[in-house]
Image: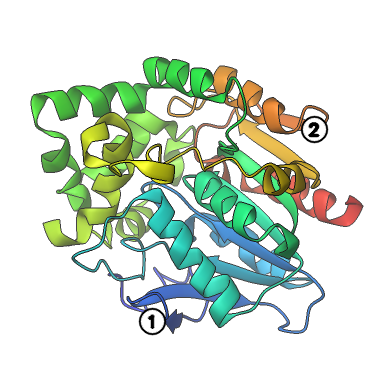
């Protein structure tokens, strides 16, 4: 767990906030006016943390309340033992924070990577609390026909998931990700694609490797891919049998699909491949805009923070 006071040479200047409502020490940033009419919630994925959004938080906080959680096992949040680290448990944690602790309404969800499935799970439970959806290089699993086939095709085409499946089959997945403090940056560059390698400074490396100081701190970063490439390690049966596909609730799905949405897609992504991700988004939002960033990879907040912020601010102003 990264210490709360760590700013990484001033690149993460946001005050730490903590809650233990979900049974572990969860960190979140909470910037901007508390009485703002609308709140922007920024959700990261694998293997990042709130630091991913550092370029967006300050500008957004001038006009909105901005909440940036770190998922369990990432960033400044704890990595407790005895937890599943499955997608639905992260949804539980997010629900405790946004509903029980902060009681947020009129939320704009900004979703990247695993933030998409986690945010979608939250929306399906609380569609009345979310106003709009801003997705970037992620998927929104709503149990719609055709979605699973697109995700299966992505698993075959994705450099990240091909590596994860091979590593699991060879018995090295936990070894590599259990040493994430040394391997995480290489994986981000090689398998998920950072299109601007010049941003990879010593400070940047410390920020993304800093949580993973020992194997016990790597439970979260191991579990995200493991639950997809090693199905026997996932939920046994029942509504959580597929960690990315929530049980269909027609009313909740319809409410989520009725919200304003946009996808901003880094077209050089080799983890969630655009030719599968864009059609998956279109299943849920056939009329919503898709903005393609031809020079960005998987981590659009790193590769194209200015373009991403401009798109998000325009989306907030016009919907």
Left or right position of 165 against 301: left
Q: Residue at x 80, y 32 (%)?
A: 289
Say if residue 13 shows up in the picture: no
Give x and y (percent) for residue 261: 76, 43
Q: Residue at x 64, y 59 (%)?
A: 56
Which type of secondary structure does the marked residue at label 2 adopt? loop
Asked whether 178 or 80 is in front, the reply is 80
> Which residue bears the numbered disc 1?
20
Task: Tell me the mark number nearer the camera, choosing from 1 and 2.
Answer: 1
Q: Give the residue pinned by disc 2.
A: 289
Answer left or right for 272 relative to 41. left
Quarter of the image with the N terminus in it: bottom left
x then y, percent, for residue 55: 59, 58
Q: Is residue 93 visible?
A: yes
User: Going by the picture, which residue comes out furthest to the front?
Assistant: 238
Instruction: Give percent across and percent down for residue 165.
Output: 24, 25
């Amino acid at each position: 767990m990264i210490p709360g006071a760590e700013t990484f040479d001033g690149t993460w200047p946001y005050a730490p906030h903590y809650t233990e409502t979900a049974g572990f020490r969860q960190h979140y940033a909470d910037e901007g006016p508390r009485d703002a009419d609308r709140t922007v919630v920024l959700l990261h994925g694998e293997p990042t943390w709130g630091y991913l959004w550092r370029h967006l938080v300050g500008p957004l906080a001038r006009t909105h309340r901005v909440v940036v959680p770190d998922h369990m096992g990432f960033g400044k949040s704890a990595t407790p033992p005895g937890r599943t680290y499955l997608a639905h448990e992260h949804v539980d944690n997010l629900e405790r924070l946004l509903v029980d602790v902060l009681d947020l309404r009129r939320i704009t969800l900004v979703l990247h990577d695993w933030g998409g499935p986690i945010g979608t799970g939250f929306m399906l439970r609380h569609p009345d609390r979310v106003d709009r959806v801003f997705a970037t290089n992620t998927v929104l699993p709503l149990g719609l026909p055709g979605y699973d086939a697109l995700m299966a095709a992505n698993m075959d085409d994705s450099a990240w998931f091909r590596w994860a499946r091979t590593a699991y089959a060879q018995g090295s997945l936990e070894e590599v990700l259990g040493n994430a403090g040394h391997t995480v940056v290489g994986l981000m560059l090689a398998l998920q694609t950072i299109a601007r390698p010049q941003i990879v400074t010593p400070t940047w490396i410390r920020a993304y490797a800093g949580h993973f100081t020992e194997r016990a701190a790597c439970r979260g970063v191991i579990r995200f891919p493991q639950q997809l490439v090693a199905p026997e390690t996932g939920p046994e049966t029942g509504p959580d049998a597929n960690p990315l596909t929530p049980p269909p609730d027609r009313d909740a799905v319809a409410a989520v699909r009725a919200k304003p949405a946009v996808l901003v897609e880094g077209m050089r992504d080799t983890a969630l491949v655009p030719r599968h991700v864009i059609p998956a988004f279109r299943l849920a939002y056939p009329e919503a805009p898709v903005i393609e960033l031809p020079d960005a990879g998987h981590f659009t907040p790193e590769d194209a923070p200015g373009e991403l912020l401009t798109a998000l601010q325009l989306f907030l102003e016009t919907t």
